[in-house]
Image (cartoon, rainbow, N blue to C red):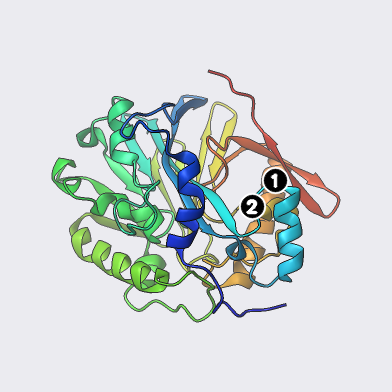
Amino acid sequence: MSLDNTSMPSVKHCANVVNAKYIHGRPGHELVPSRYAHRVGEIDVLVVSDGVLSLPGAMLGHNVDPAVRAAWLEDMFLPPDVLEWALNVVVVRSGGRTILIDVGIGMEFPDLPRAGKLAQRLKAAGIDPASVTDVVLTHMHMDHCGGLLADGVKERLRPDLRVHVAAAEAEFWESPDFSRVSMPPGFPDALRRTGKRFLKEYHSQLRTFENEYEVAPGVVVQRTGGHTPGHSVVRLASGGDRLTFAGDAVFQVGFEHPDWYNGFEHDPEEAARVRVRLLRELAANRESLVATHLSFPSVCHVAVAGDVFRWVPGPWDY
Ligand SMILES: [Zn+2]
């Protein structure tokens, strides 16, 4: 067991390891649309990929023996040192409102060049930023709120846009505690900077809630805490169908190893408790799950497998 992260490689190194593989010689061309439409009763759901983050493999469980971690990565057919993380955003339409759940990373970390594509992908999907009535932030890490800070975005949003975030989250970023995280070099500073800037730029649009808020019919944001003090999930329910957007409460490794501490978790013990509680509930309800960093489009179900969980991808149905 090691909490030492001094040997963690930089994100730039991770990007260099994988980038060559993904440059197809046609910069600017989208080979796939990177959006996936789904319905939950009367609610329209569109999962949109903001891109992919290349991060050090150690981030997926910093309380775990590196050899055990490397073995898991090998079992998953992944490279031993670099984790390829999806970055999913969701657009929800219900009761005449258009709601963006999280907004991707924008231009907040230039060493992650394969992400920050939300604006271009919303455009390709025919979604005008001026049609968005509400933004819900699961939390204020830069890969979830940075998209609203990208050049030219704010001017295209409606002036009466409402940005929903837990009161505990807004308060946390006034003076955030990074003492229990395990992040690549440069991340804590970039996260602090982005969180503060977001609070400043969107101050007049912020609508904070304590524990729960119904944004639109059947669209309820609920605070879980753990990952960050105000981390929240979004529960969709309509006509007997249910889907939960789990934000960063669940990562790929979290089904098999819910007790592995992710490097971005500000309170890792509480984050693990939140994860187990949520996965148990979703397995019992048999409802659908979408999460930020599960492989796109990430629509799946959760099954119980002994005393851990199993990830069951949904069928491609469009
Ligand atoms: Zn995240």
**CB of mark 1 near ligand 1 (< 8 Å):** no
Indicate whether 117 appears above or below 269.
above
Residue 49 quadrant: top left
Residue 72 at x, y percent in the picture = 74, 55
Callout 1 amino acid = Phe
Q: Is residue 44 above or below residue 213?
A: above
Residue 256 position, x and y percent, is 75, 53
- Structural crowding at the residue carrying mark 1, measured as other residues with C-alpha within 10 Å and reported as few (<14), some (14–19) or many (≥20): few
In depth, the one of 293 and 83 nearer the eye is: 83
* Percent x, y of residue 115: 39, 47
Q: Which residue is mark 2?
A: 79
Cα separation between marks 2 and 1? 7 Å
Query: Which amino acid type corresponds to the residue marked 2 in the rendered image?
Result: Pro
Q: Classify mark 2: residues with Cα within 10 Å, few (<14), some (14-19) or many (20+).
A: some
Is 71 displayed left or right of 133 in the figure?
Answer: right
The foreground one among 235 and 217 is 235
**Residue 103 percent location from the top left of the image:** 35, 47
Return the residue at label 1: 77
Q: How many marks?
A: 2
- Give the structural element (helix, strand or loop) at label 2: loop
Please say if 236 is above or below 173. above
Q: Is 108 on the left or on the right of 273, as rendered? A: left
Identify the image quadrant of the N terminus.
bottom right
Relative horizontal placement of residue 88, taking residue 97 as reference (left or right): right
Q: Residue at x 34, y 68 (%)?
A: 190
